[in-house]
Image (spheres, coloured by chain):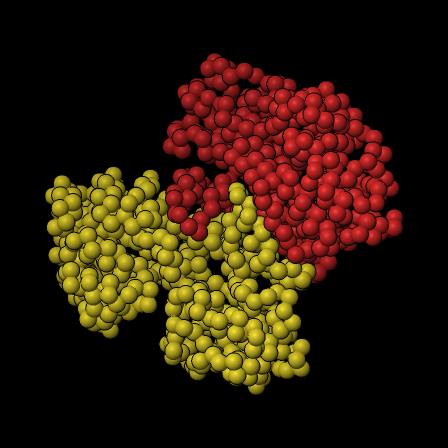
Chain colours: A red, B yellow
Amino acid sequence: MTNLINNIQSQTAKIGIVGMGYVGIPIALLYAKVGYLVTGFDIDKNRVDTLNSGKSPISNFPDDDIARAIKNGLCVTENMKLISDMDVIIICVPTPLTKQRDPDLTFVINTVEVISQHASKGTAVSLESTTWPGTTHEVIRPIFEKKGFVIGQDLYLIYSPEREDPGNRNFSLHDVPKIISGETSACLELAHVIYRQIVANTVALSSTQAAEMTKLLENIQRSVNIGLMNEMKIICSRMNLDIFEIVDAAKTKPFGFAAYYPGPGVGGQCIPIDPFYLTWKAKEHGLHTRFIELSGEVNASMPAYVVEAIIRALNGNGLAIKNSSILLLGLSYKANINDVRYSPSIEIIKILYEYGAKMEYSDPFWREFPPIRDQTIRLKAVNLTPELINNYDVVVLLTDHKDYDYKLLTEHAKLIVDTRGKFDFNASNVVRA
Amino acid sequence: MTNLINNIQSQTAKIGIVGMGYVGIPIALLYAKVGYLVTGFDIDKNRVDTLNSGKSPISNFPDDDIARAIKNGLCVTENMKLISDMDVIIICVPTPLTKQRDPDLTFVINTVEVISQHASKGTAVSLESTTWPGTTHEVIRPIFEKKGFVIGQDLYLIYSPEREDPGNRNFSLHDVPKIISGETSACLELAHVIYRQIVANTVALSSTQAAEMTKLLENIQRSVNIGLMNEMKIICSRMNLDIFEIVDAAKTKPFGFAAYYPGPGVGGQCIPIDPFYLTWKAKEHGLHTRFIELSGEVNASMPAYVVEAIIRALNGNGLAIKNSSILLLGLSYKANINDVRYSPSIEIIKILYEYGAKMEYSDPFWREFPPIRDQTIRLKAVNLTPELINNYDVVVLLTDHKDYDYKLLTEHAKLIVDTRGKFDFNASNVVRA
């Protein structure tokens, strides 16, 4: 262990990052920047080639940053045998849900199985994926133990949840305190040494379970508060009140209020998924996660609510959705990023498609309609001109990218359905949804 | 109206405050301090006499402050006829629930009826009580109109919700931005002039309904987040995790997380009550406030949860609650204030009483057991000595007043049930509830 600590502190330790996506890339870039030899592992050959050619597969990360890291010694590979060379391995693979909405640990388990086959004695392994409390202890530890590793002695097992907020430029990975935990006190000590090379502060938890729960709590609170604001939006709308005005007013209270905003639903890889990891685990203890289930239900119902608002708005002009021309603004699940995973925009497109709408879209991040899993509908992208805007029966704002010209849209759209509170609540051509 | 504005700005306007409690007293003190002649109105003769003698009826406000205001011209009275002398009337009466948990506007309506009988033309009337959206417009405005007042012309009707946080010394009334709204634009303009004399910033809302909803949203969010943390506490407890450690860890995230803590339930005049004002009004629109109802249910179930934890803890020592000696720490609903209204401590005392417990209590704010509505149980206060602490079968921490000597309690209590996360989670004599 002293050897490993020395190697880390002298920057001669080799760092392996498994899963080169939203979470893995920034960690790899940071270790490479500090001066480590970093190896990125990914099962996607395209992604491996893109990264090795100095290009970014994700718009959040500029090509330049990738190119510089590659020059500094970042190497990306599909070859998992290289795991044996690593001193520190950080696992950043996805933890999705199955179709039945249970936790799907396939990526984590497969990764850990492979690592357990190749890892050398004295390696530190850290899991960053969000998961249910007990995963590290009950699932991952036994895999290593089966291969003969003594945890805390010849393999150091760490859980340190990622806290990425895609598109948030106010906080860099370095400045966000890093939750760390270990299966033994030696593991925890190593977690501290490993992460202090790239972040300013670490926060040690008493167990890997506590660290796993901490990450879930962060996302559960977000899901519940967005759900609450979505419910409040529906109530405000029925009372002819503007929920965005009200949240902004409440937010002027300097204590005890945290601003969350309603929207057309929730998306991305975290909020719609992570909370249900706890729901699943709680059942083992005979408990129901009622706030999670309620917010899941409310948030999942928002796309249908938006479609209903479109129906009402068009109906006011004597139109059905069928054959109406609809311009959709925004495919990604939140503003100013390109991520369309689990985006409510896609859900809304599916419903409108079934209704027979004629849809086009505009999104500064997608000049062509992105490939989406289990999804065959493809829409045409358009450039927004006054004439074109005026041609649509209704314009629907789904994602409030900063690039949209809201003034232009207000002036030329016949009818606007606004899910983001960007248009004048009292304008005669604006309907909130 | 110009006259009234001039009088306010030159501090010659007479200010009347109706309801001299947690909300009315600080407003009266602030106007008196600035230099206005202030008249406080209250229906409670005892309270009127206490205040006029320069004494404080509420521990949050020091006697000195009251005495100084009285010297500066604050006068308190039961005589509502003096309303006719007032230029500005601020209503700070309670808005409780009926026994069936519907809004009870009796105090507001009675107050407004009396004001409408006595008010002179050109008076400004501001309601500060928390209430359902539409109260000012649908209930209060018609009362004045029936007496012939033209709103916005010879009576200015304002809604400006109080934002008191008893015991919070970080923010003075002057520093907390004040939400203002008016039934007409003239009313809103006056609201601005009136409140800018005592607060640094006003936040104008588009309607009295929007301002009413803003205040409800603030308290609804609090109720829901505390409910969520109470649910998470139960889950954590079953998984043998410390919810306080987890909230404190999550709170190190510099964005997107707001710390709320679980407890033995919710109390005070706001959180257990205000949200249900919206529940009631939403029904008129055929809507259910599901987050409010769920948090109400979870929060209301916490006293029984605490009692269950006491049962389990005593049971571990082979004891029943019946005839066990129990020391309760803290009667008020939150730390460092004396307010026992709707306190979960009282609920817990009631249940333990039914079980036949032998209870005593210690609370730095109550040397004698306070009078509580519909409540006949009275407990004996004790001074905490090592011997005494050691004598109880169990010590239950209900309110985490800063005056308690937690070290002394840890060292001498046989058994501690801790609802506030103040004792070592791993100590053998500590049980979390």
Give the quadrant of residue B338. Answer: bottom left
Q: How many marks?
A: 0
Q: Is residue A246 left or right of residue A269?
A: left
Residue at x-position 48% and y-position 71%: B405
Residue at x-position 15% and y-position 60%: B72
Q: Position of residue A371 (x, y in %)?
A: 69, 25
**Residue A273 visible in this rendered orientation of the protein:** no
**Residue A408 visible in this rendered orientation of the protein:** yes
Q: Position of residue A372 (x, y in %)?
A: 69, 28
Q: Is residue A235 left or right of residue A82?
A: left
Q: Is residue A252 left or right of residue A261?
A: left
Q: Nearer the viewer, residue A391 or B267?
A: B267
Give the quadrant of residue A60. Answer: top right
Q: Nearer the viewer, residue B269 or B385?
A: B385
Q: Position of residue B373 (x, y in %)?
A: 38, 74
Residue at x-position 45% and y-position 66%: B402
Residue at x-position 58% and y-position 81%: B393
Vertically, is A223 above or below A282? above
Q: Position of residue B301 (x, y in %)?
A: 55, 65
> Furthest residue to the bottom?
B323
Q: Nearer the viewer, residue A83 or B273?
A: A83
